[in-house]
Amino acid sequence: EDKVVQSPLSLVVHEGDTVTLNCSYEVTNFRSLLWYKQEKKAPTFLFMLTSSGIEKKSGRLSSILDKKELSSILNITATQTGDSAIYLCAPNSGGYQKVTFGTGTKLQVIP
Amino acid sequence: GAVVSQHPSRVICKSGTSVKIECRSLDFQATTMFWYRQFPKQSLMLMATSNEGSKATYEQGVEKDKFLINHASLTLSTLTVTSAHPEDSSFYICSAGTSGGDNEQFFGPGTRLTVL
């Protein structure tokens, strides 16, 4: 059975802090790992990672995959209150773009 | 990015009734769509994979006779919750992927189902 574990489960930081969110996975036929941000409704796509060691960046967010360690991290620098959300990691395994979601990390950024 | 819509966004129904939720890919064709369920404070759980023109593939523990999925066209998949009960109250989300080998999935806005 596929497993995805995210840590920490929740996190409260002050604006301007830097946070690192962790994701570890055990899935069969791993193809890629996706990160999503979920606010009040459905998740929105952040990153797709397929190769180890190659950092993907989007503004203050960056992410990297370690296939040897079966893990990924998501970094957010200079956090803002708008970053408050649940961040979901989702490895894609097998065909048909099937993904398995982790429990998520709930991030709260306070002014 | 690609747009996926869901309808309705919110539905309240009586126990024992059936509810149909639509998922549409608005600007792309999706041979495969996915249906997820999310209970409060929990992550998204994949219920089934909906394949255009063929039967859906259900995850373990999901009753196929209770959650009927129809993927009649490349832009529409429907999920019908039959004989709904209060424990079926949840947030149902669909997603679809674009063609071309990319694994990115685009999510619909979700449907909040409340069964009284």
Image (cartoon, grey):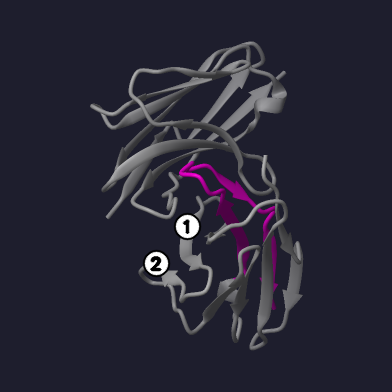
Q: Residue at x 38, y 72 (%)?
A: B61
The residue tagged with tag 2: helix, strand or loop?
A: loop
Q: CA distance from mark 1 to mark 2?
A: 9 Å
Task: Rate crowding at label 1 as few (under 14), some (14 to 19) or many (20 or more) other CA atoms within 10 Å.
Answer: some
Mark toward the start of the polypeptide (1 vs 2): 1
- Label 2 is placed on what type of residue? Glu
Q: Which residues are magenta?
A: B89-116
Q: Are marks 1 and 2 on the same chain?
A: yes
Asked if A68 appears above or below A94 in the picture, the reply is: above
Q: Residue at x 42, y 70 (%)?
A: B58
Residue B95 x/y as whole percent: 58, 54
State the residue position of label 1. Answer: B45
Q: Is residue B111 left or right of residue B48?
A: right
Residue B109: in magenta span = yes
> Tag on residue A80?
none
Task: Rate crowding at label 2 as few (under 14), some (14 to 19) or many (20 or more) other CA atoms within 10 Å.
Answer: few
